[in-house]
Image (cartoon, rainbow, N blue to C red):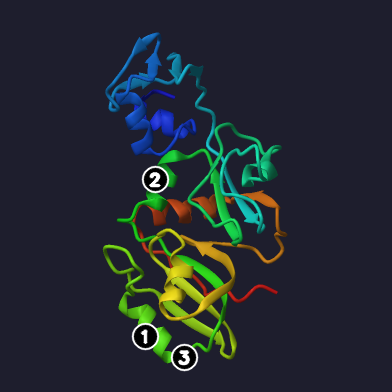
Amino acid sequence: MGKIRLDKYLADAGEGTRSQVKELIRRGQVLVDGVCVKTPEYKLDTDTAKVMCRGKELSREGLVYYLFHKPAGCLTATEDVSQPVVMDYLKEAPGKGLFPVGRLDKDTEGLLLITNDGELAHGLLSPRRHVEKTYYVEVRGVLTEKEEELFASGMEIGDEKPALPARLDILESGRRSKARVTIREGRYHQIKRMFAAAGMEVTYLKRLSMGGLTLPEELGKGAFRALTLEEVRRLKEAAAGGRISEEKPGPPA
């Protein structure tokens, strides 16, 4: 396969994002052919090099990508002895070093990307990329044009900086309203905090799409499938900062 940067090799092997593996390298936790290497840009021969990270030998196998329909009630984590995690549903999925890209709250359902491509994950999660994520939401409270304008203006949600402008599409308004929300960042509990700032409580939340990847209606909760080449291409374009045109997904059946 030729030569490749050490940090990219580790990220592709599922050891973390590019920034995380750089820290591992600088802390002296990576050996190449028995020698400690502390420079992330070090070029190694993927055909012959033996790479050890945190005491285990790595194998840079082919990258894999899965679309997972996360059910409520499980953590977005690789392991936890006390409660179910999303990776429990992918134990039979081919590929080593798999991890979820980003997080969904325990009670949130919907689209979650599972991969061992650390570079792609880093691009999709980078605040500088502004990758779009769309959610279907149900709230207690009457949604009006006032809330649409509030979301579009960039709301104060208790952080140092206001949230970036978001798109609120009202699907049904009443004592219990339904809507679709598209954001371009991924702050902690962001959707819930945005509605809380508008005086409303989220009662149901489901991610419908991310970076041009849309959750298929036929994919049941807890199920996963491999991405198509076109889906991977669209994600990589989004991660690189390209613009992805998306059809607006409808509410779940």
Q: Amino acid at mark 3?
A: Thr
Q: Earlier in the sequence, mark 2 or mark 1?
A: 2
47 lies left or right of 81: left
Q: Residues within 10 Å of mark 2 (few under 14, many from 20)?
A: many
**Nearest to viewer (mark 2 / mark 3):** 3
What mark, if any, has residue 72 been given in the picture?
none
Q: Secondary structure at mark 3?
A: loop
| The C terminus, quarter of image | bottom right
Q: Which residue appears at 28% of the width and 27% of the height?
A: 41
Q: Position of residue 119 (x, y in %)?
A: 40, 41
Q: Which residue appears at 39% of the width and 23% of the height?
A: 2
Q: Position of residue 59 (x, y in %)?
A: 52, 23
Label 2 belongs to which residue?
122
Q: Amino acid at mark 2?
A: His
What mark, if any, has residue 144 been given in the picture?
3
Q: Secondary structure at mark 1?
A: helix
Label 1 belongs to which residue?
149
Q: Residues within 10 Å of mark 3 (few under 14, many from 20)?
A: some
